[in-house]
Amino acid sequence: MSHQEREPTKEIPGPEEEKELRQKVCESREEILRFKRLNALTGIPRSTLYDLMRDGRFPRPISLGGGRTVGWLSSEVDQWIADQAEASRRTA
């Protein structure tokens, strides 16, 4: 896919979206996936995942405190995997 054919990048969430995300995590006690587990689930290399995130085609990580420590919400990753499976079956 060429640069011009890429889907538009999703906007950075605003304060209201961030608040909803925090509430979702607190209510569900959702699992936070670090990269090693994320890679095991998807089989996608780090550079490709970050390209997909940049293009708005993969869930963005959440910050786990100061520095560069991040993780992904398991529900968002699970939904992405389900969406990929559905899309691949439609085109097959």
Image (tube, rainbow, N blue to C red):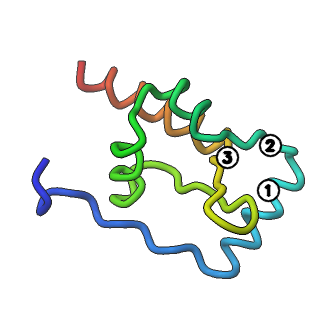
Quarter occupied by the C terminus: top left
Q: Nearer the viewer, mark 1 or mark 3?
A: 3
Res 43 quadrant in image: top left
The residues bearing labels 1 and 3 have C-alpha atoms spaced at a distance of: 10 Å
Label disc, if present, on residue 24 of the rendered structure: 1
The tag earlier along the polypeptide, 1 or 3, is 1
Q: Secondary structure at mark 1?
A: helix
Residue with the mark numbered 2: 30
Q: Amino acid at mark 2?
A: Glu
Q: Pick the residue in front: 45 or 9.
A: 45
Q: Position of residue 12 (x, y in %)?
A: 51, 74
Residue with the mark numbered 3: 73
The residues bearing labels 2 and 3 have C-alpha atoms spaced at a distance of: 7 Å
Label 1 Cα crowd, 10 Å radius (few <14 / some 14-19 / many 20+):
few
Is residue 84 left or right of 71 when viewed as pictured?
left
Question: Relative to residue 62, is residue 58 depicted above or below?
Answer: above
